[in-house]
Image (cartoon, rainbow, N blue to C red):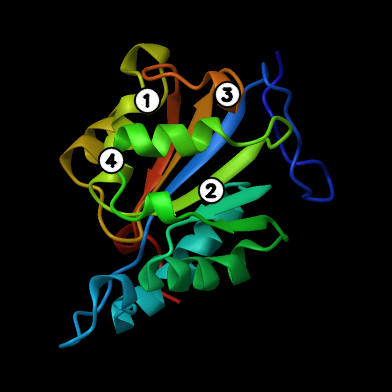
Amino acid sequence: MSSPTADPTGAPVSATDTEAVRLVVLRHAKSAWPDGVPDLERPLAERGQRDAPRMGTWLHQAGVRPGLVICSPARRTRETWDLVAGPLGGEPIVAIEPRLYGAEVEELLEVLREVPAGVGTVLIVAHFPGVQGLTLELAAARHGGHRHDLERVREKFPTAGAALLTLPTGWASLRRGTGTLTAFSVPKELPAD
């Protein structure tokens, strides 16, 4: 079984249903709370507009090349993706998935299990506490990885935070506790533009 990696052109590498896949769990960037605006329509705050592109740069430098982006329909998640996409590069398929808005861990797992075989890397843009719970449920400390990062995720998953996980099998057979957290970053750790 080989781990998916980017080919020299940077194109997403496909995976069969039994090969390792890569998941990026991204929490939306900092949002604003304007009066009278429904939660679903809350935009990014200025800080969120600064942080999201920085995370896109970090993901690009980490070698992330998603074949599929699954994004909550909330305005703040869509704006986060739009700002991450530029520095990240590539042309992934983007799916706006209503089930991600307010999703709990089991709902997020259901959505991921529906990802077609052949997609090697998925980036999911969603909300707290689902993103934190998903990362903790998938990452198993016994599988190695970055234990310090796992503790950081357990403590806090800030806005615009991103977790990178490697999962040993394809999407359809995704199970709790089988992944490895390979990296975790938050905007305040990154250099200012």
Name the residue beneath numbered marker 1: 139
**Alpha carbon separation for disc pair 3 and 4:** 18 Å
In the depicted view, which residue is nearer to us: 79 or 192? 79
- Quadrant in which the C terminus appears: bottom left
Residue tagged 4: 104
* Quadrant where the N terminus is found in the figure: top right
Badge 4: residue crowd in 10 Å (few <14, some 14–19, many ≥20): some
Residue assigned mark 2: 123
Question: Disc 2 vs disc 3: Cβ atoms closer than 8 Å?
Answer: no
Q: Rounded to the nearest whole Å, what is the CA distance between mark 1 and mark 3?
A: 17 Å
Do the residues bearing badges 1 and 3 touch, measured as CB atoms within 8 Å?
no
What amino acid type should be assigned to the residue bearing mark 3? Answer: Ala
The mark lying in front, picked from 4 and 1, is 4
Label 1, secondary structure: give it: loop
Q: Up-down: is 150 above or below 140?
A: below
Q: Amino acid at mark 2?
A: Leu
The residue beneath circle 3 is 172
Amino acid beneath label 1: Ala
The residue positioned 32% from the left and 18% from the top of the image is 141
